[in-house]
C-alpha cells in the first residue's frame, strides 16, 4: 500500500489509484463513490469540472445539488482573495461581533416568507435540521416529530432518526419520538390513486398518523418541498397547505427543509416554501445556499425563536466570516445574473427534452421535479413499475463517457437526478439531453 502521504513530499500529487487505496485504508467504509471506475475531480469552473487528466465534464449534479452560481464564480473568488490578502479574520464565533453574519441574516430574512425572519447559521443541513427540531420541541414542550417515508434530513443523530430510508440509518440508534406519515408520491401513490381520483389521501394520512401514533400533540412536522434523496418527488402545492393546517391544529411547528430546493433552484422564488405559500414556521437550508461552502441556515418565526431566550446555542464555526461572505455573495449573484429566472426557463426546456425522451424510451417511467431539480425515474416495466436500478447505473456510466455528470437517488437507486448550476444554458442542456439519449439508445440496443 502506498504511504506516500505520510512519508513523502506532501505537495506532490497522488495518482488516482493511490487516492483510492488510501481512501480504502483510512476512510470509513461509509465513504462510497459513484462509477465502477471512480472519478477523480481536481478543478472546476462555471458549469464544468475537470479530472486529473484535464478531461472536461458538464456538471449536472453539482457535487450533490450545491452548485448554484457556478463553480469558482469570479466574484466569489475575488472577494475571498481580498479577504485573505487583507488578513481579514476567518474565525470569530458569535461571541464577537462581525459584519458578515448579520448582513447574511438580513438578506435571508428579506427573501423568506413574511414573518419568518430570525436566523441562525450552521455548518451543514443536518445541523440546521437538528436546531430546527430542538427549537420546535423547546417552543411546544412536545417531543414528537412527524416525518415522511422516503425523506432525508441529514446524517447526524436526530436528523438521521427522521430519515425515511433504511439504507442511511445505522443499526441500534435510538430513534427518539419520530413517527412517519406516508410519502406524497404521485407516481407510486401509496393509496393506489391516480391524479384524476386523488383526494390528497397522503395529506390526510399526516392527521391519521398523529391520531394513531402520538398522544395527540406534536412538536413538529418536517418535509422537503421536493423530496431530494427520495428521488426528486414533487407533491402538488395543495398537499403542503392541507398538511400545514393539520400540523398547526395539533400544536406542531411546520419545518420546511429547503436544503436541496432553496437558493432559487426551483425557478420561482429564492425559497420554494415562499413560492408555494407554505405557512412554514421554520425553514432550513444548506448546499446551494453557500454555493458549496460549508454553511447551513435556519430561519424561523418569532414564536419559535423567542422561547429560546435564556438558552445558549453555540456552534464554533457556524456563520464564520468566510462562509457567510460566500453565502451572501451567492445570493447577490443569483439576483444580479437573474439566475432564478434562468432556472425556471432552463428547467422548462430540460423538462420538455426529458418528456420527449420519455415518449421514445419505455425505460423512462416518470419525469418530475421543479425548475432545475429534475428527476427521471427508470422502470424496467411501465406496468409493474419495477425499479430499473442497474439500468440507472448504466445510464450514469454512459453519460460520464459522454462528458456529462449526473446523479441518482430514490430508495432503490432508480431515479436519475439532474441539478446543474442555475446558470446552465440551452447548449449545455442540449449536451445533457444528447448524452441521455445516447445512453437510452445504448440500453435499448442491449435489451434487443
Ligand atoms: C433535504 C436534505 N436535508 C438535509 C440534508 C443534510 O445536509 P448535510 O449533508 O449538509 O448535512 C440533506 C443532504 O443531502 C438533504 O438533502
Image: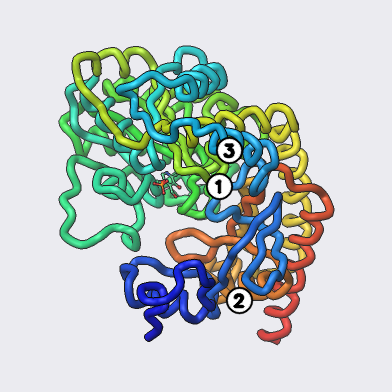
Q: Which is in the foreground here, disc 2 or disc 1? A: 1
Comes first in the chain, label 3 or label 1: 1
Comes first in the chain, label 2 or label 1: 1
Can see residue 380?
A: no
Residue 387 located left or right of residue 202: right
Crowding at label 2, few (<14), some or many (≥20) Cα neighbours within 10 Å? some
- For disc 3, the marked residue is 80
Residue 129, given in percent of the width and then of the height, sits at 35, 37
Residue depicted at 43% across the width and 21% down the height: 98
Residue depicted at 50% across the width and 81% down the height: 17
- For disc 2, the marked residue is 394
Give the quadrant of the N terminus: bottom left
Secondary element at image label 3 = helix
Residue depicted at 37% across the width and 80% down the height: 3
Q: Where on the picture, by quarter, is residue 359? A: bottom right
Secondary element at image label 1 = loop
Secondary element at image label 2 = helix
Q: As displayed, is residue 213 above or below residue 10?
A: above
Amino acid at each position: 500500500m502506498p504511504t506516500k502521504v505520510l512519508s513523502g513530499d506532501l505537495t506532490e500529487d497522488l495518482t488516482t489509484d493511490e487516492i483510492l487505496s488510501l481512501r480504502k485504508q483510512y476512510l470509513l467504509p461509509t465513504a462510497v463513490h459513484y462509477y465502477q471506475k471512480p472519478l477523480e475531480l481536481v478543478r472546476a469552473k462555471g458549469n464544468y469540472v475537470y479530472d486529473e487528466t484535464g478531461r472536461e465534464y458538464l456538471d449536472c449534479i453539482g457535487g450533490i445539488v450545491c452548485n448554484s452560481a457556478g463553480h469558482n464564480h469570479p466574484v466569489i473568488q475575488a472577494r475571498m482573495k481580498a479577504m485573505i490578502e487583507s488578513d481579514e479574520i476567518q474565525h470569530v464565533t458569535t461571541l464577537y461581533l462581525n459584519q458578515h453574519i448579520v448582513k447574511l441574516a438580513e438578506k435571508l430574512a428579506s427573501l423568506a416568507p413574511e414573518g419568518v425572519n430570525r436566523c441562525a447559521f450552521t455548518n451543514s443541513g443536518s445541523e440546521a435540521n437538528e436546531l430546527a427540531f430542538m427549537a420546535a420541541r423547546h417552543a411546544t414542550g412536545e417531543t414528537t416529530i412527524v416525518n415522511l417515508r422516503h425523506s432525508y434530513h441529514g446524517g447526524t443523530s436526530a436528523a438521521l432518526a427522521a430519515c425515511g430510508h433504511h439504507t442511511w440509518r445505522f443499526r441500534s440508534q435510538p430513534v427518539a419520538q419520530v413517527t412517519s406519515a406516508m410519502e406524497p408520491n404521485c407516481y407510486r401513490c401509496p393509496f393506489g390513486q391516480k391524479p384524476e381520483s386523488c383526494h390528497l389521501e397522503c395529506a390526510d394520512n399526516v392527521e391519521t398518523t398523529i391520531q394513531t401514533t402520538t398522544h395527540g400533540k406534536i412538536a413538529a412536522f418536517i418535509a422537503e418541498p421536493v423530496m431530494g434523496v427520495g428521488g426528486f418527488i414533487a407533491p402538488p402545492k395543495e398537499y403542503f397547505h392541507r398538511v400545514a393546517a393539520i400540523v398547526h391544529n395539533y400544536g406542531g411547528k411546520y419545518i420546511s427543509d429547503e436544503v436541496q430546493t432553496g437558493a432559487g433552484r426551483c425557478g420561482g422564488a429564492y425559497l420554494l416554501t415562499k413560492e408555494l405559500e407554505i405557512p412554514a414556521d421554520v425553514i432550513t437550508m444548506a448546499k446551494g445556499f453557500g454555493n458549496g461552502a460549508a454553511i447551513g441556515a435556519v430561519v424561523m418565526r418569532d414564536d419559535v425563536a423567542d422561547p429560546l431566550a435564556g438558552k445558549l446555542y453555540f456552534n464554533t464555526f457556524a456563520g464564520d466570516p468566510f462562509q457567510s461572505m460566500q453565502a451572501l455573495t451567492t445570493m447577490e449573484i443569483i439576483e444580479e445574473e437573474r439566475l432564478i429566472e434562468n432556472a425556471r426557463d432552463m428547467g422548462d426546456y430540460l423538462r420538455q427534452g426529458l418528456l420527449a425522451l420519455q415518449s421514445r424510451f419505455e425505460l423512462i417511467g416518470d419525469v418530475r421535479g421543479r425548475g432545475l431539480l429534475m428527476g427521471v425515474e427508470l422502470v424496467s416495466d411501465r406496468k409493474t413499475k419495477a425499479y430499473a436500478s442497474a439500468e440507472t447505473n448504466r445510464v450514469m456510466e454512459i453519460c460520464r463517457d459522454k462528458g456529462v455528470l449526473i446523479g441518482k437517488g430514490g430508495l432503490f437507486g432508480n431515479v436519475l437526478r439532474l441539478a446543474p448550476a442555475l446558470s446552465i444554458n440551452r447548449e449545455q442542456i442540449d449536451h445533457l439531453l444528447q448524452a441521455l439519449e445516447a445512453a437510452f439508445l445504448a440500453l435499448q440496443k442491449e435489451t434487443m
